[in-house]
Image: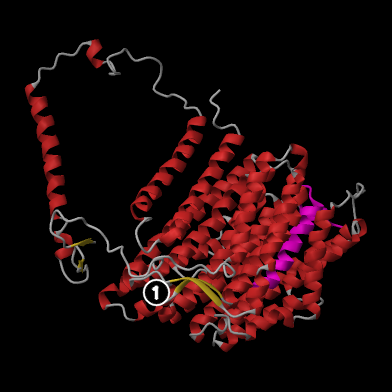
Amino acid sequence: MTTTHDLGQPLMTPLAVADPGGLIQSVDWVAIAPPLIAALAALAVLVADLFLPEARKRLLGWLSAAGLLAALAMLLPLVLGDTRSTFCFKSGGCSYTADHFALAFQLLALGGALLTVLLSLHTVEDEKLPGGEYWFLLLSSACGAALLPAARDLATLVIALEVATLPAFALVALRRDGRGAESALKFFLSSVTATAVMLLGVSFVYAAAGTIQLQGIADGLAHAPGQLKPLAEAGAVLTLVGFAFKTAAVPFHFWVPDTYVGAPLPVAGYLSVVGKAAGLSGLALVTTVAFRPYGHTWGLVLAVLAALTMTVGNAAALRQRADTPYGAVRLLAWSSVGQAGYLLVPLAAAGYADSADPLGATVAYALIYGLVNLGAFGVVALVGGTGRLESFRGLASRNRWAAFALAFFLLCLAGLPPGVVGLFGKVVVFRAAVDAGLGWLAVVMAVNVVIALAYYLKWTALLFAPSTSADVAVPRVPASLTAALGLAASGAVVLSVAPQLVLQVVSGSLF
Amino acid sequence: MEWQPLAADPAAGSGYFDAYAAIGLLAVIGVLFVTVAFTANRLLRPVVNTPEKLLAYECGVDPVGEGWAHTQIRYYVYAFLYVIFAVDAIYLFPWATVFAAAGFGAATLVEMFVFIGFLAVGLLYAWKKGVLEWT
């Protein structure tokens, strides 16, 4: 675009405006505090790493945990107060909104990162990972994941998603062996492809709707001229494909098992919870806010994706043998693919119901899943070794509390009492599907829950089976790992006793 | 002051693609020029090969070694550091033309120093990790 000045006159945009400071967007520092504090903590850790002597590097991990705690604390005034928006345009609409949807996912991202930090404290020392870089990358990624659910325009959304995933590639490769490099490369290539596809889709949507604001896109698409319809639809599909990659929905899931196996265990847990939450919240925002006019189309697409994802994930998890190396992580990886299927169900329901109400089920289920899945990864990290499922045989006789914790986490994932919170989470998801008239999807999900029972229960039974081999002495469990497991387990127990703590998001309004 | 797009609305008609006609013409002329020059050269020149003439040409010196040469990995780190400053400059120049204008205020000035501060942390990291020492 250019002006129609005569030659010789300077081509200048009209910069001089009446009110000084009028071109500057006002910033609400309280609203952006959670991701901002995480980012500042990341920077502080990176600089502190340069000046700390080798013996004091342990402090960096605790510094990261403190930073995440501070970021979590800053969620409190936002939860108690009104919805705040910032980076607003004069024409209306804001780029950052801290509504209940954003806050719930920020809690998941920052809380998940905090648990990961606690799980990682001894991993970083044991495996001699570069400390400063590890904590810096983890905090940066958490910052991106916390920024993403609050983003309300496509540019912020894409940048936040990249901030969340780019450090994750390096985190996966940090073990610096052949397996880690292969995993990271696989993760990198599939993720970069997804980003490229998504950017193409985003540009199409921008061309058709004339704005990058999510709310504006919904209006723009509804009134787009007929010639631009195919462009808009192609853009919407490509954008969804990009987010489906990050959520690891089938058929875009193939990078998951290999990436999890090669990554340090806490990072695998982090990816399965926070990485997935980032993709999922982006998907929810783009579909329910921006592409609302196409609700029935993407509702059907997401329903099919959800059915495929849970079926393929559970079937593959069922096929894991007890004696393959890294079997435990592989099983958790495939089960996380299956769980992603359940998480997609309410999104599909939102398309059919033409409202954002069913999303509450996704938020509640994601919070429950995040807590217990990180706990399960924690116990796998505690048992260590080559991570064969066989090495969990008779864990109850060696380390009673770890066995009980893992059994409880697995029952929560399966949705069986005493893991009541997992059961309630599944019921909420079911109800969202049935209410939206997606009866067939509810049936597919029921079948999948039964399939999943098989492998979760088989693993649980293995924990309490009599030990066959003469066992080595139980290694002392590091305090940080105990703290993380205690936190996850007590959280799951509290939620099982009082599920309304998390399920209240289902009934409240999110946006 | 009236804003008017250079190219017409793509949905409105063919005006948008007409704007590319000049570029297409230039491409055609370019291809023709190269084809004619090379064909004329081939038709006019005498062909008398000697071993020296068939040797790969390397700045007037006889070629040494093989075509496959390793590059030091540290060039890659330097390329990274270069990018830091290149990106820096890309954002600094447009900023420098407007930051004093009315409507921007002190926030614009501070924002750029925050940005430069981030880059400085990157440079500090590289320096403390010993990347800046060549030997």
Q: Disc 1 designates what residue?
A: A90
Residue A249 in the figure: left or right of residue A228: right
- How many labels, in total? 1
Residue A509 point in image, percent of width and height: 58, 84
Q: Is A404 left or right of A331, judged from the image as shown?
A: right
Whether residue A318 can be seen here: no
In the image, A407 versus A107, the foreground residue is A107
Q: In which image quadrant can residue A22 be found? A: bottom left
In the image, residue A390 lies in the stretch drawn in magenta: yes
Question: Where residue A61 sits: x, y (%)?
Answer: 73, 51
> Looking at the image, which residue is at 59% across and 31% down?
B130
Image height check: is B43 above or below A379? Answer: above
- Residue A38 lies in quadrant: bottom right
Label 1 Cα neighbours within 10 Å, binned few <14 / some 14-19 / many ≥20:
few
Element type where label 1 sits in the image: loop
Look at the image and give the residue range highlighted in magenta: A366-394
Q: Is residue B22 visible?
A: yes
Amino acid bearing label 1: Lys
Give coordinates of residue A198: x percent, y percent. Answer: 43, 62
Chain for disc number 1? A
